[in-house]
Image (spheres, grey):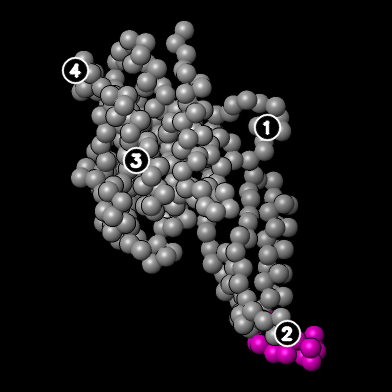
């Protein structure tokens, strides 16, 4: 039986997980940032050390392709995920799927096994969607769901443009997104919830995908003095937002479907302790 080198895989996950730590120890590798470049450089270095061909497409997706003259004409098995992170990320999210793909290829190569088709590993750009929207941007471009030009024109939360940032960090490739059409795709991913652990299961297979809807809701009220305006005469945007949020969560809990709802950000205007909010904006 062919077995991977588990210690090598875990060691690489930990090494990559040390890239992008801030002064508080939080792991932050936002897409196309300097820390993302450092993580990409580390991954590409491992690919080249293993003798795996490296290709980068125009939106910065990285591919490591292992093929031989015997199987070069076949569509590959593609294993992949992402190495960009959210703010204060864990070390396994995305990185496990990418580095597991690398480990599979290295193990098969070392064993002398020759697969009937190429095996490739991918690290997709901006899967988290923290700096640029939408999330899963690189894989969406690869699958043909959005054009490369639309992706490259994306403006980040910091005002940066993805096209310029990819060029700056050295990962604006020349291959067209979707150039590598897989025979099959496999992604290993840490569970991002407590279900498997709670049921004592070591692994699970995905049966369906999330249908994500991100909305920004704005409620307008009337600003007034918090200490002298009677409750019956208020148009309190903050109170209205609280009512909407609790309704949303109660409605979700009462549903028989596995639906979830989260209010992740909220902002009041004028955001003063003694002023009734004139506006509430939440997502």
- Is the residue 94 above or below the residue 234 in the image? above
Q: Which residues are magenta?
A: 221-236
Cα–Cα span, label 4 and label 2: 74 Å
Camera-near label (1 vs 3) is 3
In space, the residues marked 1 and 3 are separated at their CA atoms by 33 Å
Front disc: 3 or 2: 3
- Marked residue nearer the N-terminal end (3 or 2): 3
Question: Which residue, given by chain and number where applicable, does mark 4 sit on?
Answer: 69
Q: Earlier in the sequence, mark 1 or mark 4?
A: 4
Q: Nearer the viewer, mark 1 or mark 2?
A: 2
Task: Look at 28% across and 59% down and name the residue there.
Answer: 164
Q: Residue 274 has which mark?
A: 2
Q: Which residue position holds label 3? A: 41
The residue tagged 1 is: 197
**Which residue is outermost to the front?**
23
Q: Quick one: label 1 or label 3, which is nearer the N terminus?
A: 3
- The disc, 3 or 4, on the residue closer to the chain's N-terminal end is 3
The answer for how far apart the CA atoms under marks 3 and 4 are is 28 Å
Q: Is residue 272 left or right of residue 104?
A: right
The answer to whether any part of residue 25 appears in the image is: yes
């Amino acid at each position: 039986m062919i077995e991977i080198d588990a210690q090598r895989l875990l060691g690489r996950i930990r090494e990559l997980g040390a890239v992008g730590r801030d002064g508080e120890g939080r792991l932050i590798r936002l897409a196309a940032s300097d820390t993302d470049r450092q993580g990409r450089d580390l991954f590409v270095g491992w690919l080249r050390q293993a003798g795996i061909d490296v290709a980068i497409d125009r939106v910065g997706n990285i591919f490591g392709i292992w093929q031989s003259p015997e199987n070069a004409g076949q569509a590959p098995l593609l294993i992949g995920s992402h190495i960009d992170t959210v703010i204060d990320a864990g070390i396994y999210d995305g990185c496990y799927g990418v580095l597991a793909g690398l480990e599979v290829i290295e193990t098969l190569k070392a064993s002398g096994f020759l697969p009937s088709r190429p095996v490739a590993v991918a690290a997709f750009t901006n899967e988290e969607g923290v700096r640029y929207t939408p999330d899963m941007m690189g894989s969406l471009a690869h699958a043909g769901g959005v054009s490369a030009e639309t992706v490259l024109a994306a403006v980040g939360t910091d005002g940066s443009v993805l096209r310029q940032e990819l060029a700056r960090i050295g990962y604006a490739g020349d291959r067209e997104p979707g150039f590598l059409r897989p025979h099959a795709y496999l992604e290993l991913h840490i569970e991002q919830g407590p279900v498997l652990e709670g049921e004592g299961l070591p692994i699970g297979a995905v049966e369906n995908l999330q249908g994500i809807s991100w909305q920004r809701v704005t409620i307008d009220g009337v600003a007034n003095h918090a200490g002298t305006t009677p409750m019956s005469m208020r148009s309190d945007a903050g109170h209205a937002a609280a009512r909407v949020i609790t309704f949303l969560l109660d409605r979700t809990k009462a549903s028989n479907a596995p639906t979830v709802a989260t209010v992740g950000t909220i902002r009041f205007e004028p955001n003063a302790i003694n002023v009734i909010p004139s506006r509430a904006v939440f997502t």
